[in-house]
Structures are given as C-alpha cells and as structure tokens.
Amino acid sequence: MTMRYLPLLFLLLLIPGRMTAQGDLPGEAGKYYASQDYARAAEMWEQVLASGKESAEIYYNLGNAYFKMGDHVRAILNYERARLLAPQNDDIAFNLTIANQSVVDRIEELPRPFFARWMTSLAQKASADGWARLSSATFLIFLILLGSYLFSRSALIKKVAFFMAIAAILLSLVSFFLARQNHIHLKNRTGAIIQCPRSTIKSSPSDTGTDLFLIHEGLKVEITDSLDSWKEIRLPDGNKGWLKDSCLVRI
Amino acid sequence: MFRKTVIIAVMVLLGFRLGAEETRLVMSAPNAVAVGDQFRLTFNINQRGENLTLPDLSSFDVLMGPSFSSSTSIQYINGKSSQSQDFAYTYILRAKETGSFTIRPGSIEVDGKIYQSNALTIQVVSGQAQGSTAQGGQAQTDTPSGSGEAEASSATISKSDLFIRLELSRRQAWKGQQIIATVKLYANPNLPLAGFEEVNLPTYEGFYTQDIEIPQQINFKREVYNDKIYQVGILKKTVLFPQQTGTLTIRPFSITTQVQQRVRQRSFFDDFFTGVQTVRAKLTSDAVTVSVKELPPAPAGFSGGVGEFRISPELDLNEVTTNDAVTLKLHITGNGNIRLIQTPQLNLPGDFEQYDPTVTDNVRASDAGVTGTKTIEYLFQPKYEGTFKIPPMTFSWFNPQSGQYERQSTPEYELKVTRGSGDAGTGTVRQLRKQDVQSLGQDIRYISQKQERLHPRGSSWFGSTYFWSVYLLGAAAFAVFFVVYRKKMEENANIALVRNKKASRVARRHLKVAAGHLRQNQDEAFHDALLKAIWGYLSDKLGIPLANLRRETATEGLEAAKAAPELIDKMLAITDQCEYARFAPAAGNKAMHELYDRAAEVITTLEKQIKKQ
C-alpha cells in the first residue's frame, strides 16, 4: 500500500530542478581557457556572472583563469566564492591552497574547540542545498518508517521500523541544522578578501586612528561591523581593526 | 672497389704534383717604404723561365734591374735526395711620392706556360727625419739588429721611435662578443733593439680571455703607423670576451726593452772596447677603453652563447632494453664564447635514470677568434619498457653580427625500450623497489568540465517554498494516509481477528448442541450439528466464507495452514460419515458417541496445529 505514495513523494524532491538556459557561454570560455587565452576566458565567465546567475563551477573556473593570468587576489576571491557554494569540492580547496601561497601574511589561526572544528568540517562535507536535500529526504523516509511501525502486523517489522524511524528523524534534524548553518554563511557573506597591496589597519574608523598592523593583498578576513565607508574586520588570529571598504571585496 | 682505387691513385698523383712540381712565381717587396728610399722588388720562381713581364711600375723609379741570380740546393734526407732550385729576378726601385700603391701581378713563361705572380701593396710615407738613404737597401731585413749603423743619438729615446700599443679588433662590443687584442711593439727601423726584460702584459679585468698561440720568436714586420714606418713585433695575441657591461678600461702595461746605443768616446780605448752601450728603456702603453653593450632580453633556451653556432644532436641507440645506457650527444660547433656556454637542460620523462652530462670542449683560438666544438653527452637509462619521447632541446644564441638571437632545436627522438634480459626472472621473485611518486611541478587543477546549471545569485533551495513544501506535503500526505488507512485496517483486522479468535468457541458451542442431540438420540439433528461445528470452525479459522467451503477448498486451506495430512484425512472421514449418516441413519448410539469424540479431538488438534504457526 505504502509503495503507491513513494513515487509521488520523490517527485516533490525533483521539483526545484528548474533548467536555466544561458547559451553556451561557459563552454565557449572553457575552450579559450584550453587554448591559454585566459583573459578572454575570464571575461566570458565574468559575463555569465554579470547576468546575476552563479554556480560554483563558474567561480572556480574564473579563479583558475585569474590564477593563470597572475592575478592571485582575484583568483583567491573567486575560489572563496566557489567554496561557499560547494564546500565539499576538493579541487576548489586544492587550488585555493596553492593560490594562498602567494599571500604574504602568515597568520596563526585562533585555536577552536574540537566540536566546533568537527561541526565545521562536517558542514563542509556538502553544500547548504545538499544538506537540505538530505534533510528532506530523511524526513520522508522517517514518515514511511513511522507508517510501517504503526500499521505493520509483524512485531519484528515494528521493532526495526521504530529504531530506524528514530535514526531517520535525528539525521534529518542534524542535516537540517547543517544546511541552515551553511545557508547562513552563504546569505551573510561576512568573509572578504583584502584588495590593496598594503593596507594599514586602524584602531578606529577614521584616518586619524592609531595604526594597528599592516596586512597585504589576498588575505581573507571577516567583516564584523561597518560604519560609513569603514569596515571593522577580524583576522583569523582574532585581531580586529578598521579598514576602508575600498580595500576589501566581499566574497 | 674500382672507384676507390681510382680515387686513391688520383690523390697520390695530385700529391706528387703539389709536392714536387708546383711552379709559383712569387713577387716580394717591403710593404712600407719612405719617399726617396730604395727598395728591392724580387720575383722568385723555382723553375727556369723566360720572358718576365713586369707590371706597371710607373709610380716608382726603376733604378736597376733585373739582376738575375739562381741557387740550387740538394738535400739528402734518409738516403733520399731532393733538389730545389730558386731563380730570382731583382729590381731596385725608389719611391717617388707618398700614398698607397698596388703593384699588379707580373708574369713569366715556363715551358710555354704563363705563370702569374701575386699582387702587392706598398705604402709610401714621407721621408723619415733620421732615415738615411743608405738604409734603404736594408729594408728587407726583418730584424733591426742588422742596422747597427744607426745614428749615434742621445741617451733618451723618443716615444715616437719606440713604443708599445694594444690593438683591439673592435672598441664597441656586445657582452660576450669576442674581441681580439694584440700587444704590439713599434720600433723605428733604425733603432737597434737588443731584447726585452720585464714584460708586464696587460691584465684584462672584466674579460674572459683566451690566448692565441703565436710563434715564440718575435717576428718583426714593417708597418706604417701615423705616417711613419716601424718595425712591428707582435708580443701577444689574446681573444677577449667582455663579461661586464659599460665602459671597460684596460689599464696601461709596460715593457722594459734594451736598446743598443753608441756612446760618446771618452778616450781612444773606450772606443776600442765599448763603442756600443746597451740602454734600458721602459715603455708604457696608454689605457684603452672598450664600451660593452648588454644583450637584449634573452629568449627561452638561451645559454649564454654569443657568436655563430650550429648544433648537431646524435642519439646512439633508438631501440634499447631496460637499464641499458643511452647517450645523446649534442655537438655545439661554431665561433664565439664556446667555453662559456652553459649546458642546455635535457628534460627527460620522469622514468629515466639521468646522470650528469659530461662536457668536453675542443677549441682553438686564432685571429678569427675562438672556434671549436663543445660536446655534451647526456647519459641516461630507461627503467621501464615502452615507447618514450625524448623532448626536443632548444639551443639559442646571440649573433653579434645581426644583433639578434638565433635558435636551433634538436628533433624529438623516439626511444623504444624493451624489457632487458637481465630483468627476466631466474625462478626467484624479483626484488621490486617501491618508489615515491616523483613530484615534477606544482600547478592548480584544471577547470571543471561539469556544466552545472546556474541559479540566481544568492538563491538557495534551503528555505525556499519548495523546501518547506516537502515537509508540509509529506506530513499532510502521511496524515491523510494515516486516517484513511487506519479505518480500513481496523475493519479488516476486526473481522478476521475476531472470527479467528472465536472459531473454537463457536465450534465448541455447536459440539455442545450436537452432544444434546446425541443424548436425545436425534440422529439427523446430531449429524447436522456436528457438520455445522466442523465447517463453521474451518470457515472461521481459514477465513473462507461458508458458501465457498467445499472439500477441495477446505483441503487447500488446511494445507496452506500447514495442518498434518492425516489430520486432514481424519477430518474428511468425519464429514463423509456425517453426510452419509444423514441419509442412512441407524448407525447406533455407540457409533455416534465415537464420531462425536473424534470430531472433538480433530478440532482440538487442528486448533493446536494452526495456532502453532
């Protein structure tokens, strides 16, 4: 009996898959990249992004093109953007590591508690939508198991269905929260890349503020506050200071 | 075979001709004279000739000639005699005016054949202040020691009479371009030079140098410098390669010479014993500057060569077995700073054992610069079988003549490697050595080929209507399903379950009725009740409606419920007996009792057997 409803439920899962036609601009750009005309490839990918659409692949490829052109700052920026969309892609992580080698500043990251680290690394196993899909799918599986528990005549089936239903609802909850976490990252985009070759971080949002430290282009920082054209940034080592927003690009 | 013989024969014949028979007319005269000087113009020939035709000598006064002389020399070497003859025609000429004159070839007839001499160029300069006409005859002598009758001059020697000079083939050069530096000693022909002491040759700072071999014996030649005739001796020749850019200065260097001078007589005896005194004169050169230009930006594959080069590669084997050594030889031939060329890198695929290349040069310095060959041997061993490509090497050099870089590439070689016999197993397990993967370079990973669909910026499926609707619709569907299905389920479960549970109770009630009929000896009613008890029980227990219950369906149902076959037979026997008794009574009370007991037993056993499952 339950089998009759399954295809219907899975159909619901597939609904978000709307196709978007964009010509073959990305494919064309790939050809230019292959023939080492990086500048033109980058230009075409930028065009795709300018149309308001995005995907991790486009950012990743654009980052590659900028890297090959020697523009490491923009390469890092685009890799970071790609990573927000697809944190699980190891190609992006690898190229980002290589591009980060050209960043002058060496910063010791602030140590974080182990569960926070586990949480982050678990969350990065899939994108926000990936977790969301897992969450909704396990929720539906939970309903099916609940049904089998309630209506099964066999005691064995009831027992198995009961424990599996509990596992499914837990998995669904966990993946829901991971999806939410990734989604918040994606929405807020608090990360930023330093654009100016050298920038002095001030203690207050004005030019008269005390110079705190000097950072270089390509460094990833977090924006924690803003005032007029000034942004309060936090470095990975926990240091905070103010910087003119012309020196920053949001990821 | 025949062709070879012919070639050898021809060569032998040619050799004879060259060695013994060649007839040459040689015209010789000093290459520099002063106006009014007399000098000799000589024609030498090794065979007797006739009709010597003189070239046009209108620029000179012919004072005398021709005076003919001949000489014959016979040599015995190792028992072989060789004879050579020399015939000389000498004219004495006098230069009339200054300038450079070319004497065209003269000719002579020998055995009906006409031989032409070489041409000569004579430079005539204005008369030297201290030159005397008497010295003219001595012009041919190449060493000044013969002109001992020089004027008795003061103890000082004028700088214009004796000096040293560094002559460079060019004063402007590219970095690395070769410059030929010649250290020359200039001496007035009338100055009796006795020898040298303390020769401090120039130190060429900022240059890589290579000496040109010159004869040990200094050969003096006549040369005109600043409109004066000098005896010029070459002390040293060096090829210079500038290693720095900008203006390089070659610092002055000095030589101490010994000059014989006639001293004034102090007494009669003085003259007798020491008429000539040797004087030391220290000569110092001027500093010379060279301006060196930096090379234009170098292309890839430039290895420092400046000059003209050619490369010729040579691979000794095309097909090898594993662990055989293969040599790729690269010959760099040409003219320029061969010694300073760096070894071009051979980038082999990673699975070759590559050794340091060995480099040998074979170079010679001459007036044309440094020429020769640099041979680089790249030795490597293929370790695995397969077909490998040896990538081309590009050698690029700077040509100072054109001011441009030139390049030449080696071809791409293909190397076939088969498994060597040494690797073949000898029954034992081959020792395999695991290797770390060689890291050849680092680069970012290639672009993604996936054409993932694009979605609007900032949008995400999480939190969208679709996302929430999955949960809501899922839950709603479950609720509907639950309500609908639960009712039906309850109904189904009630009927079947209740009937099943009540089956034995109903059967027992029927049996009780049957027992009542038995007591009252109502045959027909008893059998009816007994049948009702059995059929009713089976209908309830097996879930088969009474209307459908027959012998066959009951048997099937019981078999499906895994009742024992003899029990089924027993039960069928009871029903048969009941049916039979209904139409043919008078079985007796005892038989009916027995039938009742059997029916009760069958129902009890069935109840137990079916419940067990």
Image (spheres, rainbow, N blue to C red):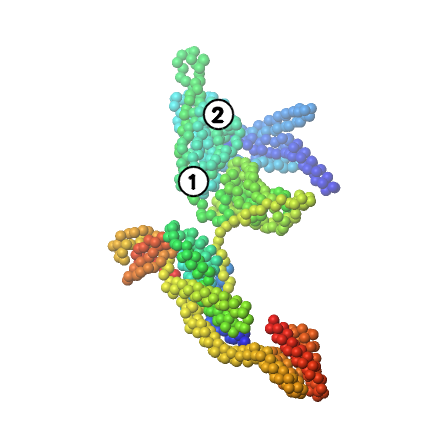
B299 left or right of B377?
A: left
Q: Name the residue under label 2.
A: B144
Image quadrant occupied by the C terminus of chain A:
bottom left
Residue B112 to residue A26: above or below: above
| Residue B244 rendering spot, x and y as whole percentages | 43, 40
| Residue B349 rendering spot, x and y as whole percentages | 57, 49
| Residue at (69% x, 74% y) in the render | B565
| Residue at (66% x, 24% y) in the render | B76
B543 left or right of A203?
A: right
Tell me whether marks 2 and 1 sit on the same chain: yes
Between residue B275 and residue B254, name the one nearer to us.
B254
Between residue B115 and residue B610, name the one nearer to us.
B610
| Residue B390 rendering spot, x and y as whole percentages | 58, 49
Q: Mark 1 points at which residue?
A: B244
The reply to whether discs 2 and 1 touch (Cβ–Cβ < 8 Å) is no
Is residue A131 something that shows in the picture? no
Q: Quadrant of residue B229?
A: top left
The Cα–Cα distance between marks 2 and 1, rounded to whole angstroms, is 41 Å
* Secondary structure category for the residue under label 2: helix
Tell me which amino acid carries mark 2: Pro
Which label's residue is closer to the chain start, 2 or 1? 2
Mark drawn on residue B188: none
Residue B277 to residue B60: above or below: above
How packed mark 1 is, by other alpha carbons closer than 10 Å (few <14, some 14-19, many 20 or more), is some
* Secondary structure category for the residue under label 1: loop
Tell me which amino acid carries mark 1: Gln
Between residue B505 and residue B453, name the one nearer to us.
B505
Q: In which quarter of the image is residue B260?
A: top left
Q: Quadrant of residue B499?
A: bottom right
